[in-house]
Image (cartoon, rainbow, N blue to C red):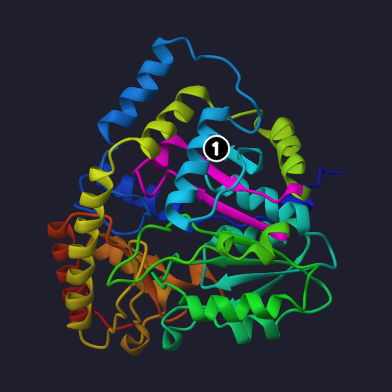
Amino acid sequence: MPITVAAYDRIGEENAFAVLARATQLAAEGRDIINLGIGQPDFKTPEHIVEAAVKALRDGHHGYTPANGILPAREAVVRRTLTTTGIEVSPDNVMIMPGGKPTMYAAITMFGEPGAEILYPDPGFPIYRSMIEFTGATPVPVPIREENGFAFSAEETLSLITPKTRLIILNSPANPTGGVTPKAEIDALVAGLARYPDVAILSDEIYDVMTYDGETHTSLLQYPELRDRLIVLNGWSKTWAMTGWRLGWSIWPDLLIDKVRKLAVNCWSCVNAPSQFAGIAAIDGPQDAVARMMEAFDRRRHIVVERMNALPNVSCATPKGAFYAYPNISATGWKAKKLASALLEEAGVALIGGPDFGVLGEGYIRLSFANSAENIERAIERIGEFLAQRDA
């Protein structure tokens, strides 16, 4: 009788990596590929951060670290959280993680089990739904609608809570839409959650400082009434262009912090030491490179919106956060994933089809403007030429 791994048959994946692999393969074959698919800053990690890691290695930091991270790294997260939210947390509630996904994994597996329901944004980061299904819980999509500025609706979110709901996942600024949920909507959600004290919240705030047009991020940490059931996900990957360092942090309530520490001991032991010293340098060092990166993203954002809206049968809402646009291509007649595949294979432009971000993603494609303005211009020109020459 063959072995069975039924739980693992439920695991999905993040298709952006499959698109990246195909784009890389085509480029290796000599094709001119413009990648607007992967969610990764095209900037190098600032030099002072790299040097901090090199110094840590030279100083002999080659061994295991505590499962929750070295104290100086956790204290750096405390300082950074105070700066960005005005809230002081204890380093004892901070977990240094090998990226952002382990926080999702830990939170969702804590609350997900057969018979449970977990609410998640749709369209949203695909790992949310994948991990919910892995646990055997029922994924309940919270619609993220273009007509609502790609913000979640507090009223709609609250209406989806049932006696089976164990966890709600929130994400603002959001991937893949670039939406930022206004504070008034978050206020309304928090007020409504008072009726459901047994429901935990995972707030994915990885893009917290990446906002535009005067928008500001509202952290769920700013609501003391949630603190005993709130998990906040954040990290270094996006803000400091450190995706490959695999370095994140999360803030946990007293009830859960030792549980996630034990999970770390069982799963990844600890985060490598030199990366943690690099993370301290990122938080405490100069932020000029972050500001320059955000200025570049803002310029590119305007190019994307202007050029995409000039294409026939395409409309593109102006993203308020992160570094993604989410153009509406439904009027072209193309199915989103079919269009994304054809653009890569025939036009040399890598994008991600909306359905890769959820069941409500049809009619949209995700475009990352974490690429040069020149490449973005070239890519959108190719998209326009393709749409003019090809029927769905």
Left/right placement of residue 189 relative to residue 49 reads right
The percent coordinates of residue 223 (x first, y second) are 60, 66
Image quadrant in which you'd find residue 289: top left
The percent coordinates of residue 348 (x first, y second) are 24, 59
User: Which amino acid type corresponds to the residue marked 1 in the rendered image?
Assistant: Pro
Magenta residue check for 236: yes
Q: Residue at x 51, y 56 (%)?
A: 14
Q: Which residue is mark 1?
A: 98
The percent coordinates of residue 188 (x first, y second) are 59, 81
**Quadrant holding the N terminus:** top right
Q: Residue at x 84, y 63 (%)?
A: 114
Magenta residues span: 229-254
The percent coordinates of residue 388 (x first, y second) are 18, 82
Q: Is residue 59 above or below residue 212?
A: above
**Quadrant holding the C terminus:** bottom left
What is the secondary structure assignment of the residue under circle 1?
Answer: loop
Using the rendered image of the protein, determine whether residue 290 is visible from the camera's viewpoint: yes
Q: Residue at x 40, y 77 (%)?
A: 364
Using the rendered image of the protein, determine whether residue 29 is visible from the camera's viewpoint: no
Left/right placement of residue 59 relative to residue 47 reads right
